[in-house]
Image: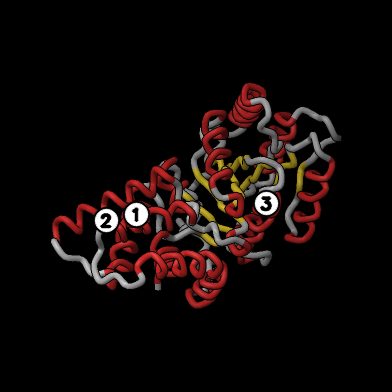
């Protein structure tokens, strides 16, 4: 069951999405317009210019090559494709890529009936908006009528614990924490135990934002999983990787490293409203084959939206 449809009105979601992608759309289509200026048909020169446009829009080299190949096949099949049709073809092919990458239609996390508590472990480097994303998720779950418990398992930074506590107070949900330097797995264990005892619906665990030592990170996250499974079999249900969309292809490189370190099941891409690099959503989805569940489009509680490939492509191209 998806819990977010009653939080976001269709009109409100579209307005936030359109505003959040405005910089990306303006940058992309200004480049595309220059690429096809004076051309009446899609030829090799137009394709070369389109390739450069996609790459400089942070779609990524591999994904760009795939899109160009798809368009080349359509040009060859249809014999004549006018540049006026290029927007429509691009929209269709990018939508197809996102579909193949397993992205759903804007439900966010789907919690099975009878699964209590549903455990989400959140990973990502410092500064990507990880704790803010957790706070917004907690707000949205609570607005949907669910009981939420947060776990401050990033015990290496006092600021991380303090920020999560502030979000807990703001949203009105409890935060389980221990003293600085405590074992993160111990915090996770206490959090899941507390949630189970209080019959909570959702647990969200914040983890340390470090990537300098993949082996250390892997061991830490594995230990957190292992101790949570002593309380709730099969936990965590989701490992959500938070990425900063404004860093473009650096976000892709971070994602690759985290996927090597732990079993990432879903992605949240934040800060898309402040950048023209929204094309990174397409590249990351296609190259990593991990579904994007949420995108961050502003500072408001509702500006973290469940990702819909249809709405995203429509907003980008319409």
How far apart are labels 1 and 3 at the CA level?
Answer: 36 Å
The percent position of residue 88, horizontal first and vertical second, equals 30, 68
Where disc 2 sits, the SS reads helix
How far across and how far down the image is residue 179, in percent? 86, 35
Q: Where is mark 1, residue-wise?
A: 48
Q: Splitting the image into 4 quarters, where does residue 261 fall?
A: top right
Which quarter shows the N terminus?
A: bottom left
- Looking at the rendered structure, the secondary structure element under dot 1 is helix
Q: Quadrant of the C terminus?
A: bottom left
Earlier in the chain: of badge 1 and badge 3, it is 1
> Could you tell whether 125 is left or right of 69 in the image?
right
Residue 201 seen: no
Side of 56 where 168 appears, left or right: right
Q: Residue at x 58, y 60 (%)?
A: 272
Residue 71 has which mark? none
Residue on which the image places disc 2: 44
Instruction: Provide residue 14's location: percent of width, then percent of height.
Output: 49, 73
Marks 1 and 2: in contact by CB < 8 Å? yes
């Amino acid at each position: 069951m998806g819990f977010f449809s009653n939080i976001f009105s269709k009109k409100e979601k579209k307005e936030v999405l359109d505003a959040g992608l405005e910089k990306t759309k303006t940058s992309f289509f200004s480049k595309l317009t220059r690429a096809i200026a004076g051309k009446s048909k899609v030829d090799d020169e137009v394709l070369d210019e389109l390739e450069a446009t996609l790459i400089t829009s942070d779609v990524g080299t591999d994904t760009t090559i795939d899109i160009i190949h798809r368009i080349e096949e359509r040009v060859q099949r249809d014999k004549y494709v006018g540049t006026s049709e290029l927007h429509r073809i691009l929209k269709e092919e990018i939508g197809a890529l996102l579909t193949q990458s397993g992205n759903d239609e804007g439900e966010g996390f789907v919690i099975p009936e009878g699964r209590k508590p549903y455990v989400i472990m959140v990973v990502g480097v410092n500064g990507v908006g990880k704790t803010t994303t957790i706070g917004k998720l907690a707000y949205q779950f609570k607005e949907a009528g669910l009981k939420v418990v947060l776990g401050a398992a990033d015990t290496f930074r006092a600021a991380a614990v303090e920020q999560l506590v502030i979000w807990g107070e703001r949203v009105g949900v409890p935060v389980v924490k221990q003293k600085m330097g405590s074992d993160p797995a111990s915090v996770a264990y206490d959090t899941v135990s507390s949630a189970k005892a209080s019959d909570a619906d959702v647990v969200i665990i914040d983890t340390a934002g470090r990537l300098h030592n993949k082996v250390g990170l892997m061991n830490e996250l594995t230990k957190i999983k292992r101790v949570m499974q002593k309380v709730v079999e099969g936990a965590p249900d989701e490992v959500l990787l938070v990425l900063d969309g404004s860093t473009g292809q650096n976000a892709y490189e971070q994602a690759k490293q985290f996927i090597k370190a732990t079993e990432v099941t879903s992605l949240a891409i934040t800060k898309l409203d402040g950048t023209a690099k929204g094309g990174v959503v397409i590249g990351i989805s296609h190259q990593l084959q991990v579904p994007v569940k949420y995108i961050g489009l502003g500072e408001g509680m509702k500006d973290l939206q469940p990702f819909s490939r249809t709405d995203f492509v429509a907003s980008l191209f319409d």
